[in-house]
Amino acid sequence: MSSIGITLFNFILTFYLTGTCDINRKDARGPVFRMEPPSRVEFSNNSGSELRCSADGYPQPRLTWLTREGTPARDVPGLRYTRSDGTLVFSPFPRSEYRQDIHDAVYQCSASNPAGTILSREVHVRGGMDFIC
């Protein structure tokens, strides 16, 4: 092996062994749900609703809400957004702005870090009706 090859090998070995990212740390832990959302949520278009999800792990897991198709639930101004704490918020809305793909849909919370990814149970969301109590 040439001296350049040996130097490159030593550099790569040193890079790997020094644990330059959290996944190489012995104390890395995959996500575990601290709070998982319920399986069903119904709400009035006048009230809106929130889906809460939280997880522990090391490094701290990133929370993402997914649609039934497995794609991220993007913010939709005035209808749906995700707060920095991972809560999926359905804002109150006029009946004329009802959208089946948002208000009668299935969501899952994903908690992910370099040590792994977990998915919550499916949450069946139904919103937009004025419920009578």
Image (cartoon, rainbow, N blue to C red):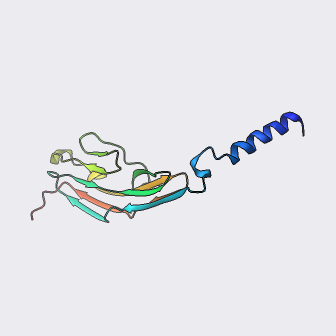
Out of 94 and 14, give the one closest to the viewer.
14
The number of callouts visible is 0
Is residue 120 found left or right of 45 in the rendered image? Answer: right
**Above or below: residue 4 compared with residue 76:** above
Is residue 87 found left or right of 127 in the rendered image? Answer: right
Corner quadrant of residue 52: bottom left
Is residue 27 found left or right of 64 in the rendered image? Answer: right
Q: Residue furthest left?
A: 132
**Above or below: residue 47 compared with residue 122:** above
Out of 100 and 34, give the one closest to the viewer.
34
Quadrant of the image containing the N terminus: top right
* Residue 94: image location, x then y, percent: 15, 45
Corner quadrant of residue 125: bottom left
What residue is drawn where x is 37% and y is 48%?
Answer: 73
* Residue 105: image location, x then y, percent: 31, 56
What residue is drawn where x is 46% and y is 51%?
Answer: 60
What residue is drawn where x is 84% and y is 39%?
Answer: 6
* Residue 42: image location, x then y, percent: 22, 61
**Above or below: residue 38 compared with residue 22:** below
* Residue 113: image location, x then y, percent: 51, 52
What residue is drawn where x is 22% and y is 48%?
Answer: 98
Quadrant of the image containing the C terminus: bottom left
